[in-house]
Image (cartoon, rainbow, N blue to C red):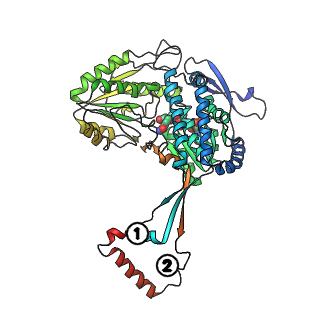
Amino acid sequence: MAIVTPVPAAELPAGARRRLRLASPATLEPIDEIEVANAADVAAALARARKAQVAWAATPVAERAKVLWRALDVLLARMDEYIAVVQRESGKPRTDALMIEMFAACDSLAHFAKRAERMLKPRKQRLHGVLALAKSLRLVPRPLGVVGVISPWNGPFVLSVNPVIQAVVAGNAVLLKPSEVTPRSGELVGKLFAEAGLPDGVLHVLLGDGETGAALVESGVDKVSFTGSVSTGRKVGESCARRLVPCTLELGGKDPMIVCADADLDRAAGGALAGAFFNAGQICFSTERVYVVDAAYDEFVRRVVERTKALRQGASGEFEIGPMIWPRQLEIVEQHVADAVAKGAKVLTGGRRNPALPGLYFEPTVLVDVHHDMAILREETFGPVLPIVRVRDEEEALRLANDCRYGLGATVWTRDGAKGLALATRIESGSVCVNDMTMTYGALEAPFGGRKESGVGFVNGPESLLGYCHVQAVLVDRMGGRQTASHFPYSAAKDAGMQKFMRFLWGTPLRKWVS
Ligand code: NAD
């Protein structure tokens, strides 16, 4: 079963671009057809973007921020329409579309509209030691030029709009390539900014699949912001390295949850469900494995199973768990569960496709008796599956949590705040939440990025916005350009004088003040 299928060449006029037919993951019925942008389309968009970027970069940040405020107004006014587009191609429950896509997008628009001017302001930086007497330093964030944004299908609107907001307010033009599985949700970003008054040519949305994405990376853009799988991210990173352009790679995750014996088990069980089953588990920082200390294990599992059984799965009306959005991902979920069961895991609830629904539905699943020889604890599952491991103590939980090639997010659950913090800082992950499901993507001040194979760079926090700039260092001489000791001609006397100066600077207790 495929939900993205190529239109046979025989059905296309000679010389036409490739086309893809799309079906709904919820019903498997046909919903759309798109034309695939090719390398020539990407090159043409890049040329237009380069021209438009010059005037856009010269527009004051405060004016650029006004476009974000207007985009926020458009989004609030058109929210139902936008949710309908996202739901149509992803099948996700309305509340998932509202919270993951719309709320997060509004929050990002408002956050950067309010703060961009301050965050992007050129600033004076005091120099160290005696250099401060001779020079002054200014740090001037300048846009990179044209940024390529490539996004996945699981958060098709928000993961497209968030990098675009930041790149655009920083003064760049953008070429956006959304996933071929959810192209119209990405297209909404273009419509949103056009309606908000972003000048023509600053943002281009190119629909297409991996071929379009690869052409975009190779096109000559000045940065690539990629969100997607590790395997594609590696290709994008290699290509950027060859071309010597920066890239941000937000890739997969296998987030651990550690439940201590003193945790509030009701809150922890609720967090486990939200972490594992929100968006049917198709979130890069979803809870993919739980380590529960022995004393809390039985009660925690009982509460989790009871609540999981109460979740509703569906295609319309009120329900909590939608379909898998991409058939290949559903197959991976099935493979991981089958591998676990074959190696001794026990399914406490779920564990199969939902026989009552026609689409790509996997029942919310709780597994126990799992161990680290199983794919379910080592590879990204990206589906509604919660494997729970009984551990002796917190040290064993930590060791297992870190026994992983991913390092995106993690959670720790304990009533002891100091212990929570201490455990959090020993987990090898980009972010950690204590006593909450992984909310760090929503904390826009927090740098959000992965360690290990979960990625390179940040998509939120000041680091992220400045990542769409080159922070130019402008060093101004305070001496009016008089010749200094470091200039030619060299001589033994100059060397001796310099050595004497160095000993004076750093060879006495004075060094603590002059360094
Ligand atoms: P994917 O890697 O298959 O595709 C992502 C995007 O890359 C799509 O737009 C696709 O068309 C494009 N693409 C494919 N081949 C390409 C190539 N050779 N060059 C350039 N672009 C190419 O990922 P997916 O299946 O759409 O998304 C799911 C993955 O994304 C999961 O692994 C998930 O963990 C990850 N993800 C990470 C984050 C994060 O913030 N860390 C967020 C969401 C999703």
Sequence-first tag of 1 and 2: 1
- Give the amino acid at mark 2: Ser
57 and 397: which is toward the camera: 57
Q: Quadrant of residue 200?
A: top right
Query: Which numbered mark, 1 or 2, is in the foreground of this view?
Result: 1
Residue 329 appearing in the image: yes
> Image quadrant for the C terminus?
bottom left
- Circle 2 packing at 10 Å, graded few (<14), some (14-19), many (20+), is few
Q: Which residue is mark 1?
A: 129
Ligand 1 closer than 8 Å to label 2 CB? no
The x and y percentages for residue 184 are 63, 29
Q: Quadrant of residue 386?
A: top left
284 above or below 174?
above
The x and y percentages for residue 260 are 25, 32
Q: Residue at x 27, y 42 (%)?
A: 422
Q: Is residue 144 left or right of residue 436?
A: right
The x and y percentages for residue 119 are 51, 48
SS at circle 1: loop
Q: Distance of mark 1 from mark 2, alpha carbons? A: 17 Å
- Label annotation for residue 474: none
250 and 110: which is toward the camera: 110
The x and y percentages for residue 329 are 49, 28
Q: Residue at x 75, y 28 (%)?
A: 12
Q: Which residue is mark 2?
A: 486
- Give the amino acid at mark 1: Gly
